[in-house]
Image: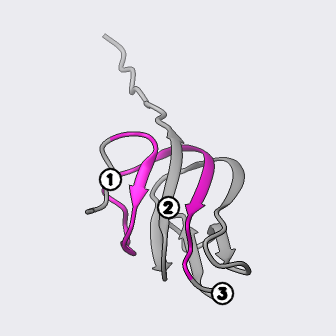
Amino acid sequence: MPNDVATSPLIIDTAASPVGTTSGYVEYVYWYNPTAIGHVAVVQDENDRDIARFRCEVANQSQILHIGRDVGEINVPTLQSGVLYIYLRRTWHRKFEAV
């Protein structure tokens, strides 16, 4: 299944930087079904700062993290197994100009 970045949650099954043209408020990141002990999944913002970093300690046990922060761009440089579900609330910025 290819990455699906058109809806929330974003569904990521392969590493990608950036993940489409995404920005907004990240509520949760859910790592579904990592397959092997020691596998890693990393989600970063546009400045390469970690939003979420997972390490599989029990095979096939999913993990979830509450994030609660705005990001300008989402990158997934590492996804060794499983699928990431990134729950994103889009923020729309409007530019108002004087008439």
Which residue occupies the extreme left position in the image?
2
Q: Amino acid at mark 1?
A: Thr
Badge 1 is on which residue? 21
Give the label, 2 or 1, closer to the camera.
2
Residues drawn in magenta? 7-35
Instruction: Tell me the quarter of the picture where residue 62 sits.
Output: bottom right
The residue identified by callout 3 is: 37
Label 2, secondary structure: give it. strand
Label 2 to label 1: alpha-carbon separation: 17 Å
Sequence-wise, the earlier of marks 2 and 3 is 3
x and y, in percent, of residue 20 in the image: 31, 57
As for residue 91 lying within the magenta part, the answer is no
Tag nearer the camera, 2 or 3: 3
Against 62, residue 56 (above or below) is below
Cα separation between marks 1 and 3: 32 Å
Mark 2: amino acid: Leu
